[in-house]
Amino acid sequence: MPAPRSTVRRGLAAVAALPLLAVAATACGYGSEAKDDDAKANVSAGGKKLSSDTVKIGYFPNLTHATALVGIQEGTIQKELGGTRVESTTFNAGPSEIEALNAGSIDIGFIGPSPSINGYSKSQGKGLRIISGSASGGVKLVVNPKKIKTLDDLKGKKIATPQLGNTQDVAFLNWISEKGWKVDAQSGKGDVSVVRSDNKVTPDAYRSGDLDGAWVPEPTASKLVSQGAKVLLNETDLWPDKKFVITNIIVSQKFLDEHPDVVEAVLKGSVATNKWINANPDEAKASANKALEKLSGKPLAPEILDPAWESIEITDDPLAETLKTQAGYSVKSGLLKEPDLQGIYDLGPLNKILKAEGRPEVADAGLGVK
């Protein structure tokens, strides 16, 4: 039985470090430093320092990363860390975040399943562990309604995904394959032109006519809708029970081995953040928007924020069975050889926290550490 989920809506991210591919991050280096000067308490006043002076956390400026946005903005994660300081970095998509994790530029990351799978596989099971879920849903196929009226009309069109091998890219390649169409995964050329485009520039590219649509996470999808695009498909509708992991939490195995107390503190902060989001959805939405304003320079307008927020489900459950399915998508697309995912999950610390709160433990679909 899955743990209770925080509900964002009412009623409620592959190919990492490809050897021959130069993957660009959102800014200089691997990512961009998040400005958290105004966040509540970077270091808890008088708090005891844990086994590390700092913990470097990576995430995306997407609403599908609401746990990180809100948890850092509200100081919920920092509160659990005491005198150990949070340093945050943002990324456009998962492959570049995995590069940063491998290089030691971040210790813990909020990230999609496809780059998690690929990062674990490429390191032969030695690079990372998934330690929690974070979000489900929040991904849509949006299109220019003047050019595309039905799903069949996508043939011959230019559709954006955030990055080669990221979770949306893999999902779209799989959807194309199931339509019986052919696309070269590496180049994106074929019956549909898959254009890898940074989420920050995709709205401008759509506005200029360089793109006919995009398979993207929120809030990018709703930004495009505000420019006249139409939602043609919500990825949630493709999944049993309308649930699939879009964001989970990973940790460098080295950092987990050396600083388990810090990892547990971050998880306590994540669980507390999700609980707060559930209890205070409107305030949480405003907090996430404030965090996005700091990262991008301006807040999301209500016509973008509200529908985007409605489509995302926040959860501590990693929805591990859906990660197994997405691993199959990566293999099917030719981006990954059949991976051995045994040991990719270490949910012991999370389940310890959930048990202490009287909540059900979450499952690892048989892919946990032995």
Image (tube, helix red, strand yellow):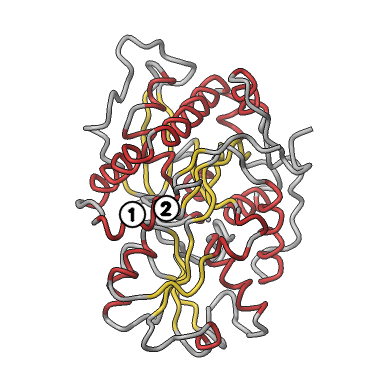
x 40%, y 26%: residue: 54
Residue at numbered disc 1: 306
Answer above or below: position of 331 versus 95. Answer: below
Give x and y (percent) for residue 272.
47, 27
Quadrant of residue 210 within the rendered picture: bottom left
Residue at numbered disc 2: 310
Q: Quadrant of the N terminus?
A: top right
Q: Is residue 218 left or right of residue 45?
A: right
Q: What residue type is labelled 1?
A: Asp
x 61%, y 28%: residue: 350
Q: In this view, does 48 lie to the left or right of 181?
A: left
Tell me if mark 2 has few (under 14), some (14-19) or many (20+) residues whose alpha carbon lies within 10 angstroms of its own: some
Tell me if mark 1 has few (under 14), some (14-19) or many (20+) residues whose alpha carbon lies within 10 angstroms of its own: some
Q: Which amino acid does label 2 sit on?
A: Glu
SS label for mark 2: helix
Closer-to-camera residue (89/177): 177
Q: Taking the image as drawn, is residue 30 in sight?
A: no
Give x and y (percent) for residue 154.
50, 85
Distance, label 2 to label 1, CA atoms, is 6 Å
Quadrant of residue 286 within the rendered picture: top left
Answer above or below: position of 353 versus 7. Answer: above
Q: Taking the image as drawn, is residue 214 in sight?
A: yes
Q: Quadrant of the C terminus?
A: top right
Closer-to-camera residue (57/241): 241
Answer above or below: position of 28 versus 170. Answer: above
x 42%, y 36%: residue: 277
Give x and y (percent) for residue 312.
47, 51
Give x and y (percent) for residue 47.
37, 11
